[in-house]
Image (tube, grey):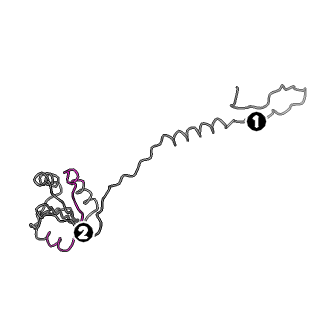
Amino acid sequence: MAGGGVDAGGGGSRQRKKGKRKPKKRISVRIDMTPLVDVAFLLLTFFMMTTVFRKPSTMEINLPPNDAKVDIAESNLLTIRVDEAKMIYYNFGIDVPKKMKFDDLRKFLVESSSQNPKLVVLLKIDRKGKFNYMVDIIDELNLAKLDRFSIAPMTDIDLKEMARAS
């Protein structure tokens, strides 16, 4: 065998003398580890070069400056309030809020945006509600191609308005 492998040691010829018996010579085994190290580093290099690291996915939110004020006509403002049970209350301008289930939201948003292309949505979610309510509604706004929306905290006035809806 050339270049590596197992070396069994020993070699040479043995001669026996009559009468005395010599114990068998123990054969030493030596394994050459160099090719194993080469293969290990080759595999390590291969996996390091071919692995693709996934970039973290984030949602980009553009925040306006603190002193920014935008005047919007009441007819172009749709206010959506969400309570802790994911019940949606909506109103245009200063109208009395109306109830809606989440399943009907996309159809309503598509119809509203087709009737009024200047529509701006103001989203208010109860603090006791789950975070994914906001994410689900923002997804629905994106699917309805409504990219002009704002998120505001819910106040006591909003809670009173929601109570008027029933």
- Which residue shows up at 18% across the image and 60% down it? 121
- Which residue shows up at 15% across the image and 56% down it? 118
Name the residue that disc number 1 marks: 28
* Residue 132 within the magenta-colored segment of the rendering: no
Name the residue that disc number 2 marks: 153
- Which residue shows up at 29% across the image and 62% down it? 131
Judged by depth in the image, the label closer to the viewer, 1 or 2, is 2
Judged left or right of residue 118, residue 138 is right
Where is 130 relative to 144, above or below? below
Q: Position of residue 86 (x, y in %)?
A: 20, 61
Q: Amino acid at mark 1?
A: Ser
Task: Identify the element where label 2 is drawn.
Answer: strand
Q: Quadrant of residue 150?
A: bottom left
Q: Which residues are magenta?
A: 139-161
Q: Position of residue 89 (x, y in %)?
A: 15, 63
Q: Compare residues 17 and 41 and report the one nearer the observer.
A: 41
* Residue density around tag 1, few if under 14, some if 14–19, many if 20 or more, within 10 Å: few
Q: Position of residue 151 (x, y in %)?
A: 24, 63
Q: Amino acid at mark 2?
A: Pro
